[in-house]
Structure formats: C-alpha cells, structure tokens
Image (tube, helix red, strand yellow):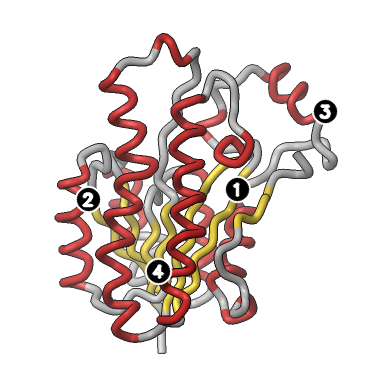
Amino acid sequence: MQKTALITGITGGIGSALLQKFTENGYFVIGQFYRNYEKTEKWENTNFCGKAQFFQCDFSDINNTFSFAEKINGTYPEIDCLINNAGISYNGVFQDSDNALLNRITAVNLLSPMVLTREIMKGMISRKKGVILNISSIWGTYGGSCEVAYSATKGGLESFTKALSRELGPSGIRVNSLSCGFIDTPMNSRFEKSDVENFCSSLSLGRTGTPEEIADAAYFLCSEQSSYITGQIIGIDGGF
C-alpha cells in the first residue's frame, strides 16, 4: 500500500530534495508552499504528476495553519509521516529586531509546526502508527550570534521533539529532529563566499552539506530501518 508524506516548505532547497527522495521511493507527497505557485504548478504537470499534490498556506498566521491542517485531514486522513521543514531566518543583531519580526519567525518556525503536528497526529494516534520529523538547525542546539530569534525558535522545536516523543511513544509514533548545519540552499546564498569558507574551515569535513544529504537522513528516519529511534536530535552538520 502506498504511503503518504506531508512535507512543509516544499519549494525550498531541502524541501525540493525531500520531495524528490520520497516520491522516487514510492510515497505520495502532500506539499505545503507559501507563494511559489509557478514552481508547484509546473511540478504537478510534469515531474511529479500523480505523485504529489501541493497546497498553499502562509504559516505566519497560525489560524491559517489550523485551517490548512483541517483541509489536509479531510482530504488525506491517513498521513504516514509529517516533516516540518518550513522555516524562515533573520540575520542581524537582536536589538534591531521588532515585534512584527519576532511574531513572524516564531509563528513560522515553531507555533505553526506545533499546530500542524497537533492536528495531523490525531489520525496517527487512532491508527497507532506514524512518524513526525522536525527539521531544525545547529543554532537551535548551540545558539548562533546574529540569529538569536531563529536560534530560539529552533531550540523550541527541538524541545518540542523530545517532549512529544515521550507523549506519543505509547501510541507507536516516533518523533525525531534533524539539526542541520550549513546546507547549500537558496536561503543560505546570501552569505559571502569567504564567510562560508571560514565557517567550513572549522568543520571536521570542511565543506557545506547538500539538500540531498538531508533528504537521505530524513528518509531513513521515516523508514522502518529506524524503528527504534525516537526523541533524538540528530546532527547533520559535517562535524560542527
């Protein structure tokens, strides 16, 4: 029987790699995106025709997220795995942030994943099976200067992962998180080449990661090969 994965932030670098990995391994993918209609429309008519369906939702408003979750539950009541991948970042000193920015980052990176998970996991609980995977960051684990708000939300996502894994374990549902290092994605293209090289020089492997490497790890954690792994924050960071 074909499995179904719900993946958020599907048009980003990691999201696109997740889409490719899961569909090529037989999953039907439900993908959330924010505003890249052109890309998702093309996908539905070409590469992923019959393999995926895409839904728009602005996660900066958790009421929108709740409505999105209800729609998904009504259309696809049996979700095998949920991957909370959507996220936004802000690079700058914390004293320059304002309330609107903090609200947006918190809603997209932490509150919306919590709301979406709460609604989607209800079906998993009734079926006594399912996998929830949160895409986090090394800054959520260690904290990053000039990315304070981002670090705080990702740290919250990791605590959410650990706590929820304990609550859902008796229902046969596993919850884990990937703590990603510097991944070569469009979101990170804003950094100067010299800054990236300096950062990579401190890593054991000495290079950036690829979205495909994140997708490989995500697929493993959603598969039966990781059936005894839950509540873990797994670093995919090149040896940070």
Residue at disc 4, secondary structure: strand
Disc 4 marks which amino acid?
A: Ala
Q: CA distance from mark 1 to mark 2?
A: 23 Å
Q: Nearer the viewer, residue 139 or 218?
A: 139
Q: CA distance from mark 1 to mark 4?
A: 20 Å
Specify whether residue 45 is in view.
no
As drawn, the label of residue 5 is 4
Which residue, given by chain and number where applicable, does mark 2 sit on?
A: 65
Q: Earlier in the sequence, mark 1 or mark 2?
A: 2
Which residue, given by chain and number where applicable, does mark 3 sit on?
A: 201
Q: Which one is closest to the eye, mark 1 or mark 4?
A: 1
Q: CA distance from mark 3 to mark 1?
A: 19 Å
Q: CA distance from mark 3 to mark 4?
A: 36 Å
Q: Earlier in the sequence, mark 3 or mark 4?
A: 4
Which residue, given by chain and number where applicable, does mark 1 sit on?
A: 179
Q: Quadrant of residue 123?
A: bottom left
Q: Callout 4: few (<14), some (14-19), or many (20+) C-alpha neighbours within 10 Å? A: many
In the image, what residue occupies the spot 36% across and 32% down? 105
Q: Is residue 74 left or right of residue 9?
A: left
Task: From the top left corner, tell me how far across and down residue 160 is, in percent.
Answer: 44, 54
Q: Quadrant of residue 90?
A: top left
Disc 1 marks which amino acid?
A: Ser
